[in-house]
Amino acid sequence: MAALSDPTRLGIVRVLSDGAERGWGQFRAPVAKSTLSHHLKVLREAGVTQTRQEGTRCFVILRRDDLDARFPGLLPALLSAALADGVGEHVTESSEED
């Protein structure tokens, strides 16, 4: 739960909530790249996301099925509340990876 308490991490989850895999360079947030990398690491280590490396590029996807099985209803409730309160809206995505 602590992994989802940070607005930037919640913003990353909001971006990933459509089920699509994204390259790390596609995330846009008003933080340093090293800080964004830290947030992605926290989500991965908490089991919220899964990371796949392809050559020098890394891709991340939300582990939605696993989260829904372990915590039924949590993710929809969390995303709904975040959307209503505007939490995490500072994290967006670009169509191209750096």
Image (cartoon, helix red, strand yellow):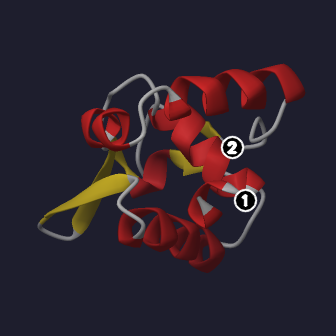
Q: How many marks?
A: 2
Instruction: Say which residue appears at 58% left-offset and 34% top-offset.
Output: 14
- Farthest left residue in view: 55
Q: Nearer the viewer, residue 97 or 35?
A: 35
Residue designated by label 1: 6
The image quarter in which residue 91 lies:
top right
Residue 61 in picture, x, y percent from top left: 31, 44
Of circles 2 and 1, the one toward us is 1
Q: What secondary structure is marked by label 2?
A: loop
Instruction: Say which residue appears at 49% left-offset and 26% top-offset.
Output: 73
Q: Amino acid at mark 1?
A: Asp
Say if 80 sits above or below 23 in the image: above
The image quarter in which residue 77 lies:
top right
Residue 9 in picture, x, y percent from top left: 62, 55
Instruction: Say which residue appears at 38% left-offset and 65% top-offset.
Output: 44
Q: Residues within 10 Å of mark 1 (few under 14, many from 20)?
A: few
Residue designated by label 2: 91
Q: Quadrant of the N terminus?
A: bottom right
Whether residue 93 can be seen here: yes
Q: What secondary structure is marked by label 1?
A: loop
Q: Quadrant of the C terminus?
A: bottom left
Residue 30 in picture, x, y percent from top left: 78, 57
Left or right of 26: which side holds 31? right
Say if 12 sits above or below 86 in the image: below
Left or right of 49: which side holds 3? right
Q: Amino acid at mark 2?
A: Val
Whether residue 94 can be seen here: no
Q: Residues within 10 Å of mark 2 (few under 14, many from 20)?
A: many
Left or right of 76: which side holds 22? left
